[in-house]
Amino acid sequence: MNLAITGNRSAAGTLGKLSSRHGSRTQKRKTSASAKKTNARLDWKENIKFLFNCFMKALVIVIFGAGCFAGYNLFMESPYFKVDRVHFSGQGGIDKSELLELTGPIEGENILMLNLGQVSEQLASHPWIKRVSAQRAFPQSVQITIERRIPFVRIQLEKVYVMDNFGVLLQEDAPAFKNLPIVSGLSYKDAAPGDNVATEEMILGLKTMDYFNRHPYFEGNPIVKASLQGNNQIRFISKNENVAVAAALDSMSESLQKFMIVLDTMDDGGKDVEWFDLSFTNRVIVKHRTDPAAPGPTS
């Protein structure tokens, strides 16, 4: 009997343990399910919060963009920033209407959106204009300062043109420029105002002419004509056409030094001299009017 009782107690204990384990598993399942529901509710709230934050950020961006666009349109259309006056200075005899034709419309344009670099570039295409400076004068004015080219000589091409000291053709010859020196002997086809026709030979010739005219000998009777003859020869003639100078371009520097010595040592200031020949490297040939064999300067 005792054995039977002992055996039943053992069985009952075993059943109790199993029941306890089963209850524990059930409780765990309930707890796990409850935690999952709680986590699901938390995840849903986090998602809603994230979406709301994204919506608010997007709304702020849209409002900011719309404000910028409206402000930009207001700025562009505001009459306060419209150019109502263009002031030119330094243009000399160039008519304002001619300048405005080059720049295109400026008045009525927004002053900050105006491309001043392009305006300057367009004006600089004019043959008479050397440099241009354009600046805004707030709120509604544009100031344009022009530096004109200076007429230096006349040059004989297919037509006679006025040229500056950089070799740029300014316009066709006119009576107003009759006192300018004239250069001939240069070959250049289809010339037009604005073209740069300078060559090394011509530049050297113009520098030499200027050098001559600084000497007291040519005071009152300056060199006013220069003729390039071939690739190496140049001939100068004075205003009164009674003095001529011939020279070789490739030995000009040495010849000028000797020529200055000759001018400084001549008797009576060289008043009877008709012809100077600097073409030789070792001497200067001087021909006087009293010499019947001496050619005239215009021959």
Image: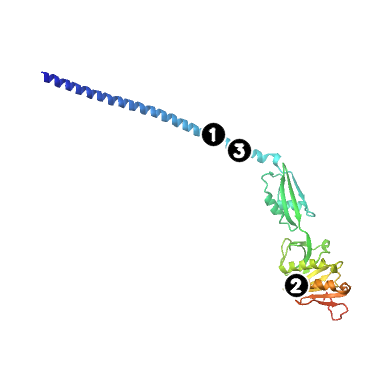
Type of amino acid under label 3: Cys
Q: How many angstroms separate mark 3 from mark 2 (CA)? A: 72 Å
Q: Residue at x 20, y 22 (%)?
A: 13
Q: Position of residue 45 (x, y in %)?
A: 44, 29
Type of amino acid under label 2: Glu
Type of amino acid under label 1: Leu
Residue furthest to the left? 1
Q: Residues within 10 Å of mark 3 (few under 14, many from 20)?
A: few
Q: Which residue is mark 3?
A: 68
- Badges 3 and 2: C-beta atoms under 8 Å apart? no
In which quadrant of the rendered view does residue 32 lie? top left
Under tag 2, what secondary structure?
Answer: helix
First of labels 3, 2 by sequence position: 3
Q: Residues within 10 Å of mark 2 (few under 14, many from 20)?
A: few
Q: How many angstroms separate mark 1 from mark 3 (CA)? A: 14 Å
- In depth, the one of 292 and 121 nearer the eye is 292
First of labels 2, 1 by sequence position: 1
In which quadrant of the rendered view does residue 241 lie? bottom right
Q: Quadrant location of the C terminus?
A: bottom right
* Viewer can see residue 33: yes
The image shows residue 152, relative to residue 277, as above or below, that is: above
Q: How many angstroms separate mark 2 from mark 1 (CA)? A: 84 Å
Q: Which residue is mark 2?
A: 254
First of labels 1, 3 by sequence position: 1
Under tag 1, what secondary structure?
Answer: helix
The image shows residue 169, relative to residue 270, as above or below, that is: above
Q: Which residue is mark 1?
A: 59
The image shows residue 106, relative to residue 254, as above or below, that is: above
Q: Position of residue 295 (x, y in %)?
A: 83, 78
Q: Which mark is residue 138?
A: none
Marks 2, 1: nearer the viewer: 2
Q: Quadrant location of the N terminus?
A: top left
